[in-house]
Amino acid sequence: MSAYFAPLLGGILIGLAAAMLLLLNGRIAGISGILGGLVGRLLPRTAPAGSGDVAWRIAFLAGLVAAPLLYSAAATLPAAQVDADTGTLIVAGLLVGLGTRYASGCTSGHGICGLSRFSPRSLVATLTFMAAGFATVGIVRGLL
């Protein structure tokens, strides 16, 4: 598979999955909301009444894990390169988690699903995510 075809195919599949989840299930394909909803429904003390939507959440998350496994059967996965130590990755993950809580969603929920629905809140959230990412790269690469 060419270096240009794989990202195009991936984008098409993400768009189709997001559209199908919205059209067939009435749900937004935001990963933080899907995972957070699953955890909230599996913990007995926080589970809301009528928490019968666990199966689709598990299926969606299982698909995220299965997709690269299936891809690797047909082609070689690109090599992953992480230029950060474990502590930096933990702090970064916690900051991303905090940001998704403040923004009421993640880049997939706001950037893919929200923007396609012309949500003003998603536009502001996506611009904020992108600006923070640009600033972080500029600071880390420029100053450190």
Image (tube, rainbow, N blue to C red):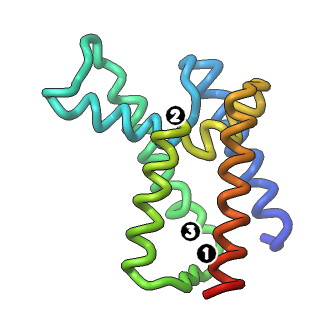
Q: Could you say whether the residue bearing mark 1 is in a helix, strand or loop?
A: loop
- The alpha-carbon separation of the residues under discs 1 and 3 comes to 9 Å
Nearest the eye: 144 or 106? 144
Residue 123: quarter of image: top right
Q: Earlier in the sequence, mark 3 or mark 2?
A: 3
Residue found 42% across the figure and 47% down from its top: 62
Q: Could you say whether the residue bearing mark 3 is in a helix, strand or loop?
A: helix
* Discs 3/2, front: 2
Nearest the eye: 25 or 105? 105
Q: Which residue is mark 3?
A: 73
Q: Which residue is mark 2?
A: 104
* Amino acid type of the residue that numbered disc 1 sits on in the rendered structure: Leu
> Which labelled disc corresponds to residue 49?
none
* Amino acid type of the residue that numbered disc 2 sits on in the rendered structure: Ser
Image quarter where the N terminus lies is bottom right
Q: Earlier in the sequence, mark 2 or mark 1?
A: 1
Q: Could you say whether the residue bearing mark 2 is in a helix, strand or loop?
A: loop
